[in-house]
Image: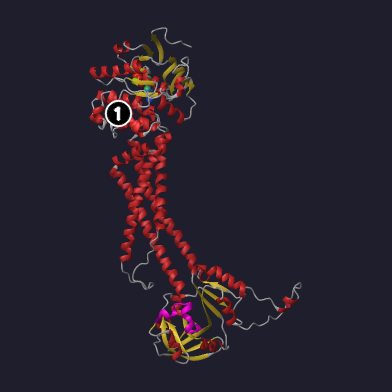
Amino acid sequence: MKLILTIAWTHVRSRARHTGFAMAGVATGVGFSIMMAALMQGSQDDFTQRLVNAMPHITVYDERRLPPRQPAEQSFDAIEIHGLTPEARRPGIKNPLATMAALEAWVPGGIAPSVRVQGIIRYAGRDVGTAIVGIDPRREAAVSDLPKQMRGATLAALYRATNAIILGDKLAEKIGARIGANITVQTSQGARIGAHVVGFFHSGVRQVDEGTAYVLTRTGQILARQTGLINELRLRLTDHLSARAIAERIESDTGYKSVAWQEANEELLSAFVIRNIIMYTVVGAILLVASFGTYNIVSTITHEKARDIAIMKSLGLPEATVRAIFVVEAMMIGLGGALVGFALGYLLCLGLGAVEIKNPFLDANRLPLAYSAWHYVLAGMVALISSVAAGYMPARRAARVYPVDIIRGAT
Amino acid sequence: MSAPTASRPVEQAASSSVPLIEAKGVTRILPGIVPTTLVHDINLQFRENEFVAITGPSGSGKSSLLYLLGLLDLPTSGEVLIHGKATAHMAEAERAYTRLSQLGFVFQFHFLLPEFTILDNVLLPMRALDRLSAEAMQERAVEILSALSLSDHLNKRPDQLSGGQRQRVAVARALANDPPIVLADEPTGSLDSHASEQVFQLLRDLVDKQGKTVIAVTHDLGLAQRMDRRIQLIDGGLVGETPQDSPPQQ
Ligand SMILES: Nc1ncnc2c1ncn2[C@@H]1O[C@H](COP(=O)(O)OP(=O)(O)O)[C@@H](O)[C@H]1O
Ligand SMILES: [Mg+2]
């Protein structure tokens, strides 16, 4: 093994400039792959984080996934019954306090009840469809970042006026409402009230900022025209990644449709999958192109060293050893390139992280970058494997050389 | 001048009735539009402690025969046996191993690796065989090179030596794994008469003092006369042999 390393090292060194170029190719591939992965993952993490912060991790709705079994079906199970008028169901979660208490007993995190109604906000002749959520400001901190997202007022401002309302900042912009404005809120249930804008919030997720308003629970119930109505429970978990499993259990325990944040944003998250596939394809292509350089240099060396190969084979070095010499050379290029690439990738990330940007879609003025050892390990491994694969072909060809052909030619 | 002799491989202890190396009906034809016959139906036996000259005009197939005996080339038909063992159908790795452990080759041109020192060149076959410890290899390589008066040049590269010195390094490398057979293809062909004589003496000593079998191609009839046995080739065929009684033809 030491022999193989010694010979390989001698060859690589004797071709320092060329191997340098091949290494630079691999390094560039690795460096940019790392940068791209950091950028992709960074923006994905950043977006997910904002999503997770802006939304409840789990929302329990007053709906069921399957239509409820009708009383007649329950009593006469064997019979198929047609033409029943379905029993009208009163909206809302039954016994919300008891349900909440039951959940609080085992769910790690906070719970808050709320009433959500669809309404139209009218101001200065403009109508905007809005989700209006009646909340309990004292409980809100346990389930969302809303208290932190407030602009121009605190959440407690909801108590300061009758029918106080807090608007998403984009929504307020759209209708041109300022703090103190009196707007009209109308719901499909037929309620219509005048509300007093006491503050804005900014969550960073456009759909939320454009289409959500908060009121007190009581106001929400008035808008829904049903006293005591609670039609959703919002949960924030200590670990947002456990949301799916917990939502499933809540659903089977209570029968109410429970939606984890991942499910609510499935399309977005699957867009990330596609984005990642694109990223890995591009990164793979970069590294593949880099491995062509390795192929090239190993081929060159095997041609230049044809006489040495013949000598080694004539001395009795087996094919496998000769092959290994050139595979190791490719590995040295891959390894050297990967190490330089790590440094390059890190520097690129630092550089990119230092760039200030103004992007209307991002709150931060720096690019979000994820620093992960995995990116380095992965890029390094792909570089190494593709280098070895690229070196293997010329190495095999070289090892098969028939020494006599070359010795005959030389004497 | 006596290069140290490491313990001989076990195979060699086999009875002396088995030739060390034997060619049985060896024919080598280069395929092509006009196939070229390099050697034709060669039958030869070599035993331990022989000093053999292969002579013949240029192009008569001397080198080709040596490559076949040295397992560098495969016969089109016939068989080369080492210690009575057929080699034609050996796996590549086994043939390489046999070459590494049983055969030492010295070419007309020294064929040293240009980027390695003299010492590393001699160490190469030992490292490939990997039978000794690193220290023992080093020690042995230095001993062999010293015995060939090369101890001042251990860390030089081949291009820093004279032709005669390089050829002696090539001999040292051939002896690295202490093979019982040394094959030399015009080892003095590119040397002046002084260096030529030195290398010849070296081969002579291998036979006389170490009991090795040396088969050397030469077109220098003077040198051939000083060897123990001469084999003459013309047009790829065996035409004569002195002394006459030596090989039992089959
Ligand atoms: N690769 C080859 N292609 C065609 N002819 C060859 C080749 N190698 C050797 N020969 C021919 O084979 C014959 C024997 O060559 P060789 O064994 O080198 O002879 P010698 O060593 O006795 O000079 C010569 O006629 C030579 O021209
Ligand atoms: Mg010749």
B161 lies left or right of B178: left
- Residue at x 39% of width, y 46% of height: A387
A73 lies left or right of B189: right
The amino acid type of the residue labelled 1 equals Val
| Location of residue A73 in the rendering, given as x and y in whole percent from the top left corner | 72, 76
Q: Label 1 belongs to which residue?
A: B142
| Location of residue A182 in the rendering, given as x and y in whole percent from the top left corner | 43, 91
Identify the image's colour scheme: rainbow, by chain, secondary structure or one colour: secondary structure
| A266 w.r.t. B5: above or below | below
- Span of residues in magenta: A132-150
B178 or B248, nearer to the observer: B178
| A110 w.r.t. A340: above or below | below
Task: Say if the magenta span includes residue A134.
Answer: yes
Using the rendered view, name the quadrant where residue B203 is placed.
top left
A164 or B129, nearer to the observer: B129
| Location of residue A156 in the rendering, given as x and y in whole percent from the top left corner | 44, 86
| B142 w.r.t. B216: above or below | below
Q: Which corner quadrant of the figure contains ligand 2?
A: top left
A343 lies left or right of A41: left
Determine if residue A23 is in view: yes
